[in-house]
Image: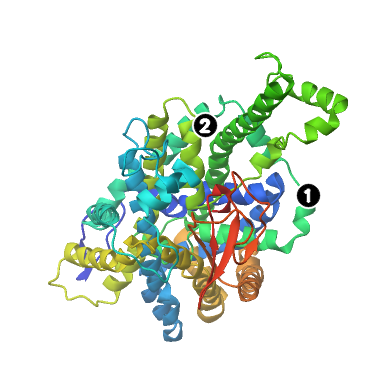
Amino acid sequence: MGETKESGVEERPKWDNKFQYLLTCIGFAVGLGNVWRFPYLCQIYGGGAFLIPYLIALVFEGLPLLYLELAIGQRLRMGSIGVWNSISPLLGGVGGSMLVSFLVGMFYNTILAWVLWYFFHSFQNPLPWSTCPVNENQTGYNRECEKSTPVNYFWYRETLNITPDIEASGCLQWWMVVCLATAWSVVFICFIRGIASMGKAVYVTATFPYLVLTIFLVQALTLPGATDGLTYLFTPDWEILKNPQVWLDAATQIFFSLSVAFGGLIAFSSYNAERNDCERDAILVGVINSATSLYASIPIFSILGFKATNGFNACRQENILTLTNHFEFSDQNITLENYDHWFQFLNHRNPDVVSNLSLRDCVLKTFLDQSASGTGLAFIVFTEAVLEMPGSQIWAILFFVMLFSLGLSSMFGNIEGILTPISDLKLIPKWIPNELVTGIICSICFLLALIFAQGSGNYWVEVFNSYVGSVPLLIIAFFEIIGVIYVHGMKNFSEDIYFMTGRRPNIFWKACWMVISPLMLLVVLVAYVVVQAQTYPTYHTWNPDYKIDGETLGLENPDRSTSHCFLTFMESSIWTHEGEGCCWFNI
């Protein structure tokens, strides 16, 4: 993959083959959100019913924008800033996607550092989040851990060593600094030779997650409760489609899932041969990305169904023990199989006695409703579910290697979205090797990302995740379409596509580019800003020192509890942050 010269002009590097290019685009598009965001949205928005707005957004918003980016990058053979400056100097600001890629890459790689931390600890037997550590006096278990759960404690205290709020920065956590340095070192090694080395790495990082998902699928479908999880996930609730928030979330999910407007896809396509069927590439990448989201949902919610079933059975076991002791039945008289029959019988014969026993209300749907996404799913819910699976260490190792591969492929796009514009703009003297430029960029990102290695780091990750990659990308995407279709011109763009593919875009693509897609983007942008403006900014905090007497300041929803966990709200000068106590489902 060298550089040749033709007519005295230095030629742009090219991919080794078409498969390598497609794998890179798919790896960039398919990221952590496909595993921990899409299934969550399906769950809370009517199961299978959510697929309707999702697919509509894919067809009329996602694919047209993906096609446009791949086409314009391939035709002009430049990075984001170069592309938009070539179309019009007034559109140079759209190349601000380079800055977004820089900021997103900083916090995104922090998540990979957390994944590495869990991966390193997954080799221990037993897994370190399976039990509470002993206290300093060796006389019992850690008090903070006992208030919560071992899984919560390992995440909030052992991993993050989290501070009470964002205003208390805390000191740098050396173990997080080491993991963060390791994560950035891996990125640098993969990028040390540009697309030549990154193109080789993507053969592993883009394909390995599918192997792991398939292994998890086979195992998960054999677990008790898997059917309940899948039924809950895909049972459609058509009434929820009347909620505008469902359509907004579907549109934003497909938009961010495809990784458009970052500049990475434009950079990747710029290394293609000029005559290449970019329409087929866009459809293939878009369909595979959405199919991966659906495919990942099956093992994820099979395992969550298994976890919910275990929780449901444990709840009923407590009630069985209470009933057995009170009515002095012999052991094994009341079992999980005949519990409902016994409960109805005793409740009919002795309603006052049964009501005074304070039995827990055990409903399977309640446990299935305890949804989570993002880090809450990966580092809390799933790690707890793994503990109950046979061979838990193996599944933990596979899970975190899969997450790292998914995240690393996405990081390739973020870094390429930074390096390609810098190269195209000739900002770096020619005598400085590309390896040094890559090393400098990674080093700067690492040093700035140390803010995420502090005790308040998780709060900053949430802030960056909520605001850096949302409105800016929607604005960039909107002006991308306007710039290409109405500044460069639909006729010129149509001729560009004819030159590259041998055919002009059909009426569907033209209708989407000229009217439907920009209109949808504008509606999503306005709606998103309105929703954000009406919502006071919040972030979640770890608050183990809660009170259970109902006297906590600002206590709200004291009934929403698991083992005396509840939600508190505390105000600071800038934010409102939610004290999570020890409820995993509030994450």
Q: Is residue 22 visible?
A: no
Q: How far from the left and from the top, in percent, is residue 140?
A: 39, 38
Position of 475 compared to 28: left or right?
Answer: right
Identify which residue is drawn at 66% across, 32% down.
Answer: 228
The residue pinned by badge 2 equals: 217
Q: Residues within 10 Å of mark 1 (few under 14, many from 20)?
A: some
Which quadrant of the view contains residue 295?
Answer: top right
Which quadrant of the view contains residue 103?
Answer: bottom left
Q: Is residue 118 visible?
A: yes
Position of 267 compared to 224: left or right?
Answer: left
Between marks 2 and 1, how big is the CA–CA gap? 27 Å
The residue pinned by badge 1 equals: 238
Which quadrant of the view contains residue 533?
Answer: bottom right
Identify which residue is drawn at 64% across, 32% down.
Answer: 315
Residue 437 versus residue 376 in the image, above or below: below
Kind of element beneath mark 2: helix
Position of 67 compared to 207: left or right?
Answer: right
Farthest residue, direction bottom: 90
Residue 457 versus residue 203 in the image, above or below: below
Identify which residue is drawn at 57% across, 34% down.
Answer: 307
Q: Residues within 10 Å of mark 2 (few under 14, many from 20)?
A: many
Q: How far from the left and from the top, in percent, is residue 349?
A: 87, 24
Q: Nearer the viewer, residue 265 or 229?
A: 229
Q: Amino acid at mark 1?
A: Trp
Q: Nearer the viewer, residue 390 or 341?
A: 341
Kind of element beneath mark 1: helix
Q: How far from the left and from the top, in percent, is residue 467?
A: 50, 70
